[in-house]
Image: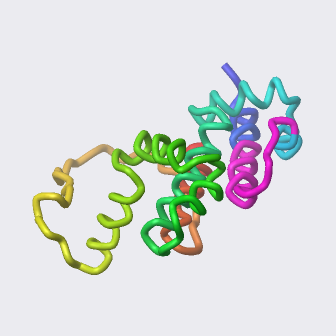
Amino acid sequence: MAKPTTDRSYGQRIERVVAYIADHLDDPLSVERLADVACFSPYHFHRIYRAIANETVAATLRRLRLHRAAVGLSRTRDPLARLARKTGYGSVAAFTRAFVAAYGMPPAAYRSHAGSISSGQTANTEEVDMYDVTIKDFAPVRLAALDHKGTYQAIGTAFSRLAA
């Protein structure tokens, strides 16, 4: 088992990489460059990243790019082809498959669903998912937290950093 200081150091390095990825979503990102950001060898970096982030670097990059595309769908009228290219997909079909896998609906449906929610118009109140709320008492525990400054749409990066 690793020492607590090693775990903390590795977590900080991976957090630095997640922030770098979020700031460079449009850049070509190689494992070698990200390993440099984390101050690891590429092989060691890939193993450590996957162990800490619970996903590969490619999965993180895909998830963050698709999240940005979802924001674009809900806030802009950009054509799907432009959003697909910006997300790193060569075709709308490939983008749509990836988007459906991540969000459970095609981009066009997501755009209309997000538009109806943001304008306050829902055709059917049963379509809006609500969470069951249960209040439980627990013994005191230590928590970890990170500040997030900026739009809610960028909070995914804060969650990725916190997971690291």
Residue occupying image coordinates x 18% and y 71%: 122
Q: What residue range appears in magenta? A: 12-32
Q: Residue 78, percent across and down? A: 53, 71
| Residue 14 coordinates in the image, percent (x, y) | 72, 42
Depth order, front residue of 109/153: 109
Question: Residue at 29% across / 64% down in the picture?
Answer: 113
Compared with 153, 109 (above or below) is above
Q: Is residue 69 left or right of residue 137?
A: right
Helix, strand or loop: magenta stretch:
helix
**Scheme of colours in the image:** rainbow
Q: Nearer the viewer, residue 31 or 95?
A: 95
Residue sticking out furthest to the top: 1
Q: Residue at x 52, y 66 (%)?
A: 79
Question: Where is residue 154, by image quadrant?
Answer: bottom right
Is residue 72 placed above or below 9 in the rendered structure?
below
Say above or below: 152 vs 105: below
Farthest bottom residue in view: 119
Q: Position of residue 145 (x, y in %)?
A: 53, 57
In the rendered image, residue 22 lying in the magenta stretch gets the answer: yes
Residue 7 magenta-highlighted: no
Which image quarter is the N terminus in? Answer: top right
Is residue 27 left or right of 32 when viewed as pictured? left
Q: Quadrant of the C terminus?
A: top right
**Nearest to the observer: residue 106 or residue 29:** 106
- The residue that appears at 52% across and 56% down in the rendered structure is 67
* Tally of marks: 0
Q: Is residue 114 left or right of residue 25?
A: left
Question: In x, y percent, where is residue 19?
Answer: 70, 55
Q: Nearer the viewer, residue 71 or 93?
A: 93
